[in-house]
Image (tube, rainbow, N blue to C red):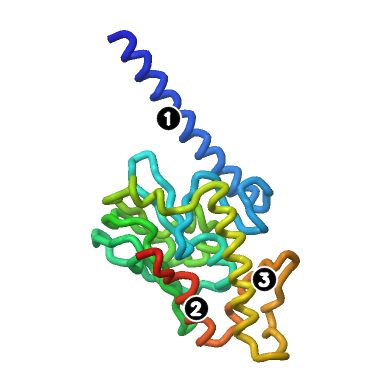
Amino acid sequence: MVALFVIGTIITCALIEYFRGRTKQRALALKSPHTRNGQHDRFLLPRGFFLGEGHSWAELLFSGNVRIGADDFAQKVVGTIDALEVAPLGSEIKKGQPLFQVKQGNRTLTFPSPVSGKISQINSQLFDSPSLIKQAPYFGGWVAVIEPANISAELKLLAVADDAARWLRTEVSRFRDFLNTQQPAGAAMPAGATLLDGGIPMNGVLQSTSDETWKEFEQKFLCNSKNN
């Protein structure tokens, strides 16, 4: 019994230290959004966050639930976010199904859920201040919390740490190629579509593109068939 008590105490202390570390990292990220730690090619990528192929992220909470939002790549290339819609509280959703939608004028982009489960919480602050998604996409700009139905299997299908950085690098390259194919041969890119060093899209690049390009971006980057 004593041995079990000691082992239990050690495990409890380890868990407390882990979540203290996550809390400290969250605070540092909020205070210093441009720090190199936790970024990849100027896109914020905090440690411990899982990225889905539809550019929605997942954070496993101490309660066992999963907090979800739009990743930094998506919110940057989209530009201004005027409004947000989220699937109803309490609804059941499967991995890859639409979870939330961001609006820019008359245009919308739909993000899939990276996990299956029941929506237990929605960030109501975003309805009045959708700009929070841009100000702090992984923290104050989170969208919903889900009670997962099959988390052990589905987390394995998401990217984290070095795998997430490699995947994001591939997405940046794919997005650069995507923009190039949207312009007629010899045509100049629209205002705001300049690509920075290393092929990093400028903030809000999609605002300068056509409605057709906007929808094609949604199909190629947010509605990947592998999410289903």
- Give the amino acid type for the residue marked by disc 2 in the picture: Gln
In the picture, the disc for residue 169 is none
Disc 2 marks which residue? 104
How many angstroms separate mark 2 from mark 3 (CA)? 17 Å
Secondary structure of residue under mark 3: loop
In the image, residue 6 lies at what x, y percent? 37, 13
Is 216 situated above or below 62? below
Mark 1 or mark 2, earlier in chain: 1
Secondary structure of residue under mark 2: strand
In the image, residue 128 lies at what x, y percent? 44, 67
The residue positioned 41% from the left and 60% from the top of the image is 143
Q: Is residue 107 left or right of residue 86?
A: right
Disc 1 marks which residue? 15
- Give the amino acid type for the residue marked by disc 3 in the picture: Met
The residue positioned 51% from the left and 54% from the top of the image is 138
Q: Is residue 145 left or right of residue 211?
A: left
How many angstroms separate mark 1 from mark 2 (CA)? 41 Å
Q: Residue 113, located in which quarter of the rendered image? A: bottom left
Disc 3 marks which residue? 202
* Quadrant including the C terminus: bottom left
